[in-house]
Image (cartoon, helix red, strand yellow):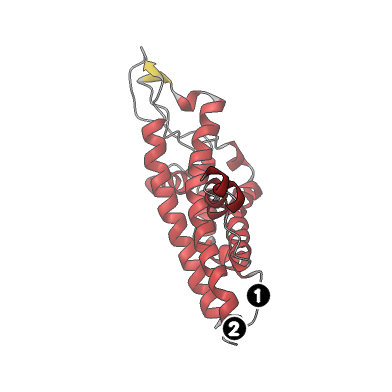
Amino acid sequence: MLKKTTFKLSLSILGSFVVGFILSFFIIISLAPLGATPSSKSSSAPTSSSSNSVSYFENEATEGGLVATTGGRIFLAAIAMLITEGAIYSSAWREGNRDPNRVKYGHMKKFMAKGFVAGLLSIIPNVILTILVLATADLNNIFSNVVNVIYHIVNIQFIILGDGYMKIPIACFAVLLIIPLFSGLGYISGWYHFAILPKLIYKKNKPAPKSQSKKNM
């Protein structure tokens, strides 16, 4: 049962990642132009650079905006990561919250690295996409451009900070490890029934001591 549930968790994490980057993409393209001013330059289609990277957030018809400043890019990246990694963390947390009962009744063995393993399995499609991007980096054809566009959209939470890291192949794979990191932490937190939001709500709405309530009466 452990293998089966680990595989199902990896699919759940992958689904959360897909939902996360889609929401992040639309939010970022909506917020990116904020503060931009009209440019005197005529608009033209973006061209591929030597690294086959295209900027999808800067329009030549405008100048400025959130993407024009480091602080703006960090803000947009933080939103994207909060959405994407938050969804991944939640999926793993729910699985971790269920597993103690499965272990207790002998349905599976305890495996605290389940979230990390499932997270690693979930990034396999992204690893393949990254390999394709790196392999076609020096090409300038329809296939390489399509792959490059897909990569930029899927990994928008990293790309918004700048695609300079793509010049270092190992860095392209290293950034993907943030996904198994959050899924692993989410699973462990769920196992120990540690939930941040309920704790904050409980502290905020914590009832007054009985002695104090009697005095008020």
Q: Residue at x 47, y 55 (%)?
A: 17
Q: Amino acid at mark 1?
A: Phe
Q: Is residue 63 above or below residue 114?
A: above
Classify 10 Å Cα crowding around label 2: few (below 14), some (14-19), many (20 and above). some
Classify 10 Å Cα crowding around label 1: few (below 14), some (14-19), many (20 and above). few
Q: Residue at x 49, y 50 (%)?
A: 84
Q: Residue at x 49, y 23 (%)?
A: 68
Number of numbered labels in the structure image = 2
Q: Residue at x 51, y 51 (%)?
A: 86
Verify CB contact (< 8 Å) between mark 1 and mark 2. Answer: yes
Distance CA(mark 1)–CA(mark 2): 9 Å
Q: Which residue is mark 2?
A: 108
Looking at this rendering, what residue extends furthest in the bottom direction? 106
Question: Residue 172: where, in percent of width, then height?
Answer: 60, 48
Q: Which mark is residue 111?
A: 1
Question: Residue 186: where, in percent of width, then height?
Answer: 58, 60
Question: Residue 88: where, in percent of width, then height?
Answer: 51, 57
Quadrant assignment for the N terminus? bottom right
Question: Residue 45: where, in percent of width, then height?
Answer: 35, 29
Q: Amino acid at mark 2?
A: Met
Q: Nearer the viewer, residue 42 or 7?
A: 7
Q: Which mark is residue 119?
A: none
Which structural element holds mark 2? Answer: loop
